[in-house]
Image: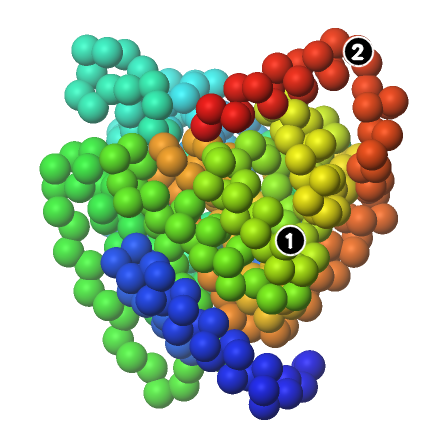
Amino acid sequence: MRIIHPKLRKQIAQWRYAIVRELSGDTVGGISRENKVQIHFDGDATYHAMLEAISAAEHYVHLEMYMFLSDAIGNTFAQALSKKAKEGIPVRVIYDSIGSSAADPMQWAKMREAGVKVIEYHPVAPWRKRAGIFGRNHRKNLIVDGIIGFTGGMNLGDPWSYQQFKENAWRDTQIQLTGPAAYDLALLFNDSWLYCTDEKLESTPPQPREAPYGSSRCMVVGSQGLGSRKQIRKLFSVHLDQARQSVKMTMPYFVPPRRLRNSMRRACQRGVNITLVLPRNSDVPAVDWLREGLYPSLLRWGVNVIEYLGPTLHAKTMVIDDNLAVIGSNNFDILSVLMNRETAIVVFDDQVTEELNRQWNNDLSLSEPVTRDWQGIRPWWRLWLAQLGCLLLRKL
């Protein structure tokens, strides 16, 4: 484990105080201690851990999922949740109407028949209660008994499974929490459930243990969608403003609003080394074109832009000064920071940052830097769309 100089340790303590002060009222329970944190980069290993947690549930299982498909992985989870409900354990599921639009409706019918309470978030049909197009539930949260929680970028579907997609499996990151932070995730679910159903869930904190689950300090930040206090935007801006040495960001969709672009520019002016790992070609081409419209400004400010050339990149992580990590469902784009329900976990743990840095180096081995002559490797139509995107982003 890395030895921290006392002066740096004091700086980290001041940093924690500044973050909590700036995000006062936007975190679920402040900074929680004695959490066990596990980072997953492999989809199959993540799903195995999630299924094990569901199988061992004693009090409840709560799932809040943007994309819950009806493929092999989705069916496996549907069966596991249904089995647990038949055992008499309360199982509640919130799926996003647009994110899960490709799912077979019979999947929800069978789960309901088994006793699972299934809720569709923001139905697209205008005659449905709380229907809507904007303000999606983009979370990927699983909470079991208020003790174990998962969140990050992984949805429930075959694209994240090497067994199903082989070498084309998506590159993503998920965090597993055991301890008080998982209960904070449970409170986020309760808020979503109340919004969708008008039913207030009573969650009792887990009984304290004599031995701690782990040694990690975590902070859970959740945005509530349209009309909220823009918690995710604050989260990003605070960390960019507090950074002193470096920011390493991995993001699949990078279209930040003006305030966050200004935070990046100010950080560069202070001498902070910002490096972005972004996909050259994501699963949403329009986002790629918009993102490339920002390249001239980013390069002029001194931001290091790296394009990932491996399988589809979907991880959403940030490491600041190699001392603090942020892992969540949120992208660095307008939808995540202004409109969607998202979850982000701030982790104060050297081992976690070291683990993310190791994966960062793996990603760099499959990447190429964007240089000032980057336009030479783009077709003319893509450059035209990038210029159009740049004009649009000036207004946001």
Location of residue 117 in the rendering, given as x and y in whole percent from the top left corner: 25, 36
Camera-nearest residue between 11 and 198: 11
Location of residue 282 in the rendering, given as x and y in whole percent from the top left corner: 67, 28
Question: Quick check: 73 above or below 304?
Answer: above
Left or right: where 269 falls relative to 332? right
* Residue at mark 2 to residue at mark 1: CA–CA distance: 30 Å
Of tags 2 and 1, the one toward the viewer is 1
Question: Quick check: 253 above or below 393?
Answer: below
Residue at image coords 81%, 14%:
379
Give the image quarter of residue 341: top left
Q: Mark 2 points at which residue?
A: 380
Camera-nearest residue between 390 and 232: 390
Residue at image coords 61%, 74%:
350
Residue at image coords 43%, 53%:
235
Is any part of residue 235 visible from this angle?
Answer: yes
Amino acid type indicated by mark 2:
Trp
Pick whichever of labels 2 and 1 is earlier in the sequence: 1
Marks 2 and 1: CB-CB under 8 Å? no
Q: Mark 1 points at which residue?
A: 268
Question: Quick check: 304 above or below 14?
Answer: above
The numbered dot on residue 372 is: none
Residue at image coords 49%, 36%:
258
Location of residue 72 in the rendering, given as x and y in whole percent from the top left corner: 57, 31
Camera-nearest residue between 60 and 317: 317
Is any part of residue 117 visible from this angle?
Answer: no
Question: Quick check: 250 above or below 170?
Answer: below
Amino acid type indicated by mark 1:
Cys
Left or right: where 347 falls relative to 351? left
Secondary structure, mark 1, is: helix
* Label 1 crowd bin: few (<14), some (14–19), many (20+), radius 10 Å: many
Q: Residue extending furthest front? A: 269
